[in-house]
Every structure is written in C-alpha cells, then in structure tokens.
Amino acid sequence: MSNDKEQGLATRIVHADRRFGVAHHAIRKPVHRSVQYGFDTVEDLIDVFQGKLKNAYNYSRTGTPTTAALEAKLTALEGGIGSVSFASGMGALSAIFLTLLRAGDHLVSARYVFGGTNSLFGTMRHLGIEVDKVDSCQVANVEAAIKPNTRMVFVETIANPGTEVPDLAAIGELCAERGLLFVVDNTITSPALFQPKSVKAGLVVNSLSKTIGGHGVALGGLVTDTGLFAWDNYPAIADEYRKGDPSLWGLTQLRKKGLRDMGACLSSDAADQIAIGAETLALRIERTSRSALALAQMLAAHPAVSRVNYPGLPSHPQHAIAKALFKSASWLLSFDLKETDALLPFINRLQIPLRATGLGDTRTLIIPVAPTIYNETPPPERALMNITDSLTRVSVGLEETEDLLADFEQALSGI
Ligand SMILES: *Cc1c(COP(=O)(O)O)cnc(C)c1O
C-alpha cells in the first residue's frame, strides 16, 4: 500500500480504510453507533476535551470513528489535509458560510448555484453578510466584484441545472493573488473527475448525497481543506482557535463552530452507507458520463430539441475548460424542447427515467426545472440563470446506454 501517487482513484478508494487501522482483521469498518464515549480516568476525559488524545471522541455530534474513516477516505481523494463531514451538503455549506464569514464581510458567488445555496444567501444577507452573484464564466466579472471587505469567492464546478463551468483556473489564480478564500463545490464532478486543489481552491465541498454515495440511500456533506489557504490572516477565525498549526485553524473552526454548535452531524449509519457507495464511484461515473455524452449528442441532433447543455459537447460555451480540467463532463445534462407545450407529455412518455428530483442516483432521474425546483424563483431571476420554461434536467444513471437512447428516441418521436 505504498506510493499513493501511482495508484488510480478506483484502487485507492477501495483500499483507503486499511491505512487507518483495522480491528480484528475485519475488511469492512464497523459502524460505531455509540453517542457517548467513556474513559478509565477523568484525566483522559479532560485530555479528550482539550484535543490532547489522538483519535479520541467525546460526543458523536463532533464525530465518530465511522465518520472519521469516511472523512479520511475523501481527504485522500481530494488531496487535502483534512475534512469535516456534515448531515448534508447544505449542512456543509451552511457551516462554511455562517462560521467563516461575519456580518460586514462580502462573498462573491457564481450566479449559477444550487437552489438551496441560493436561498441560503438570502438568510446570510439578513444576518449582515453581503453576497454578490456574478457570471463566473468570465474571471473579469469576479474581479470586478471584489471589494475591500471581500473574504471569499464561491463557485460550483458544473452548475446545476444549466451546466455552466466557471473559469476555475483563472479564478483560483485571482484568489491566490488577492489572498481570498476560494471555495469550490465539487458535487457534480466529484473527486473522480476533478480535484479543485489543482485550481488553488482552499476549501472543497462535496454533497455526499449525490454521486459519491451514489445510491440515493443516505444524505451527507463534506468540507475538505486543501492546505493551500493561509488562515493566519483570515479575520473570521475566533481567538480561541488561533493557536497551534495555522493550517488547521479553518478545519477546527468548521468542526467546533460549524459541526458542534450548529449540530448538522452525519450519522455513523449514513457515513457507512456512503463509504460503501463510494467504493464504486470511479466505475459508476465512467458509465454515467459515457451515457450522458451519448444522450447529449443524440438530443443535440434531434429536430424537436432546441438546446442541449452538456460541457462534453463542443458547442458548450465552456467546453474547452471542461475538457482541460475534468476527466469527463459528468452525468448531468439539461435541454430545451422547441415546443414548451410538448414537454410534460414527452416526460410522461419516458419509460426508464424516474420523474423525480435528486441527482447522482443509480437510476436516471428527470425533472422539468422551472415549475419544480425553481418554482419559488421569480421569472426575471430564472432568466438570469438561463432557466427557460421548458428546461429539463437529466441525472443519468447506470442503465445500459442503448436502452436510455432508445427510450428518449421513442418519447421524442411522439412530439
Ligand atoms: C445537492 C447539492 C447540494 C446540497 O446537497 P444536499 O446533500 O442535498 O444537502 C449542494 N451543492 C450542489 C451542487 C448540489 O447538487
């Protein structure tokens, strides 16, 4: 198990657990359900509270051996120095935005972000945190939005549902020059397709509920510190965490203020489900990406379809960036039909995809975007996000590519 660098992701992910100790020669990690942790002496208990005992736990809200094993596995895949797990992707994002920004701080975010994240920005504004959203496909827009109180820049690798790809490398460079914390939501690509550390991200977020867990049976979220950001000068770090190795200050604050105080902790059972799912991440994403590309190509060539959003198509505005940075263009695509009226009957004619929200399942999921997940978003704001009335999102699953193509063909032919 030597030499991490020469082994591919699929190899590392299935063997990662063994590197952190195996009890009783058991190949699978046990699930530790205990909420409490007891010690032989009160001195040990005190040491655990003061962080002096390694691999020790005091209360499962701040972690368990099972969540720690999952954190270690994903830290390795992201090439980071440590991770903190949360009950969901939104739990992870809330912890970042609400514990690493303070009233009066300014966040520059991509305009194209997950609906929950966009809604959270509203809450942050009520708390006195300024948020400006820009079209992050051009780094100049990000640069123009930076103000003296800007602390953080936030983007998603491939935006859902429009599949916009920010100018990741240029934004990372800009943040490094200006000393800004660059936070990248890697959910759609996952570490199987892309490591945000390669574009100088300081923190990486993954919703584990999507392709990493991969089977739609557990929610989870995770923040990984890449080790690239210098926390020494970051104003929001509380005085009590400004001691010891500065590279750990961000993670400490996320675990204490984010996980312990806000309480959105991942359960050991969910962590175990996600860890099992993650073992096949590399294999699954190969299939789902291949099918997504084939489906995008077929839809783009179909007379009933007016537009297809998929970064793997040469017609996609950020195709070159996606090709340069991502191993493949992922399992997420969206498209518009020429006739909006034909949309709902078309979706009902599909036999294989489930008419469902959610992403990154084993099964293909399809949803018309405007009347569902963007139902609360006013039409002008939808328009800014390139969300038209007929925009339909597909999360491609593990079905045979040919079966999926045939099903979409038959449903389209009814238009
Ligand atoms: C789903 C999603 C989230 C939120 O994750 P949950 O685990 O559902 O809370 C955040 N970001 C992106 C890009 C997502 O797709």
Image (cartoon, rainbow, N blue to C red):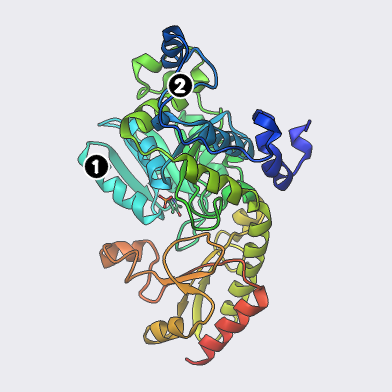
Taking 196 as reference, is 37 above or below it? above
Give neighbour class at mark 1: few <14, some 14-19, many 20+ (Cα, 10 Å). Answer: some
In the rendered image, residue 246, in percent from the top left (x then y), is placed at 49, 17
Where is residue 296 drawn, in percent x and y?
A: 59, 72
In front of the other: 324 or 189: 189
Q: Residue at x 36, y 86 (%)?
A: 341
Q: Which mark is residue 125?
A: 1
Left/right of residue 224 with respect to residue 399 in the rendered view = left
Q: Report helix, strand or loop for mark 1.
A: helix
Pick the front one: 277 or 407:
277
Residue under numbered circle 2: 249
Residue 128 percent across, percent down from the top left? 22, 36
Does label 2 or label 1 sit earlier along the sequence?
A: 1
Quarter of the rendering containing residue 338: bottom left
**In this rendering, is residue 139 above or below 375?**
above
Estimate the x, y position of residue 186 in percent, counting from the top left: 52, 47
